[in-house]
Image: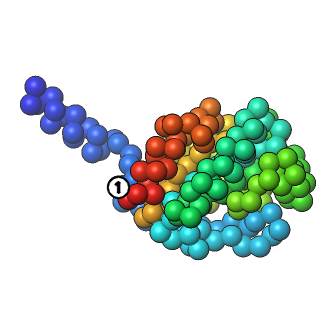
C-alpha cells in the first residue's frame, strides 16, 4: 500500500498540472484591447482574482452573461475581475463588430465588466494569453466551446478552469471564486 501511495505521488508530481507549476510568465504580462480599442492590460489587475471567459452573442450559453454580471457585481469589491473575451471560433456565433458586441452586451444584459475585442481563443493563432494558458495548464485551459472559464488566482497563475456547461452561478464555480478571494 505504501509503495502505491509513493508511486501515485510521483505520478501526480510529474504529470499533474496545478497553480503551483513553474510559470515562465504570469497572466499579468498579457494585454488585450477592449471593445473601444483601448489597451486592456492584465497587469492592472495584479493581486486580484481574474475570471477570463470566451463569449459569443449567438450561443446557447449566452444567457450566462447574466450570471457573469451578477458574480462581478457581488465580488468586485472583494477583488474579482470578470473579463469577457468575444470569439468567433465556435460555430461562427460571434459575427458582430466591437460596436455591435458592446451594444448587445450593454442593452441585453447590462454588462459593466471589461470586455475585449474579438480574438481567437484556440489553435496556433490564438491570442497569446490562451497560448500561455495551454502551455501552463494543459488542454483543460483550451476552450472547447463558448463560455469556457479560466480562473487566475491572486498570484497570476491559473487556479482552475470550467467548461461551458458550468454556470458562473453554480455552487462549484462560486466556491472556487470565494476560496481564491480568501487566499
Residue extending furthest toward the left: 2
Q: Residue 63 sits in which quadrant?
A: top right
Q: Classify the position of the C terminus by image quarter.
A: bottom left
On screen, 27 above or below 72? Answer: below
The percent coordinates of residue 180 (x first, y second) are 44, 54
On screen, 133 above or below 1? Answer: below
The percent coordinates of residue 19 (x first, y second) are 39, 53
Q: Residue at x 40, y 57 (%)?
A: 182
Q: Residue at x 39, y 46 (%)?
A: 17
> Which residue is denoted by mark 1 in the rendering?
20
Q: Is 34 on the left-hand or right-hand side of 28? A: right
Q: Residue at x 74, y 60 (%)?
A: 112
Q: Is 50 on the left-hand or right-hand side of 2? A: right
Q: Residue 12 sits in which quadrant?
A: top left
Nearer the observer, 15 or 57: 57
On screen, 151 above or below 80? Answer: above
Colour setting: rainbow
Nearer the observer, 6 or 97: 97
Q: Residue at x 10, y 25 (%)?
A: 1
Amino acid at each position: 500500500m505504501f509503495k502505491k501511495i509513493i508511486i501515485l505521488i510521483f505520478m501526480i508530481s510529474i504529470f499533474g498540472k496545478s497553480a503551483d507549476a513553474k510559470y515562465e510568465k504570469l497572466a499579468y504580462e498579457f494585454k488585450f484591447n477592449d471593445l473601444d480599442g483601448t489597451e486592456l492590460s492584465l497587469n492592472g489587475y495584479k493581486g486580484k482574482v481574474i475570471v477570463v471567459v470566451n463569449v459569443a452573442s449567438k450561443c446557447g450559453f449566452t444567457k450566462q452573461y447574466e450570471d457573469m454580471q451578477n458574480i462581478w457585481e457581488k465580488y468586485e469589491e472583494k477583488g474579482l475581475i470578470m473579463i469577457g473575451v468575444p470569439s468567433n471560433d465556435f460555430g461562427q456565433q460571434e459575427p458582430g463588430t466591437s460596436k455591435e458586441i458592446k451594444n448587445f452586451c450593454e442593452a441585453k444584459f447590462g454588462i459593466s465588466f471589461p470586455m475585449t475585442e474579438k480574438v481567437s481563443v484556440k489553435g496556433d493563432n490564438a491570442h497569446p494569453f490562451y497560448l500561455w494558458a495551454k502551455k501552463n495548464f494543459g488542454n483543460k485551459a483550451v476552450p472547447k466551446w463558448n463560455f469556457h472559464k479560466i480562473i487566475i488566482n491572486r498570484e497570476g497563475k491559473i487556479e482552475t478552469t470550467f467548461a461551458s456547461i458550468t454556470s458562473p452561478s453554480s455552487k462549484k464555480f462560486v466556491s472556487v471564486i470565494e476560496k481564491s478571494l480568501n487566499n
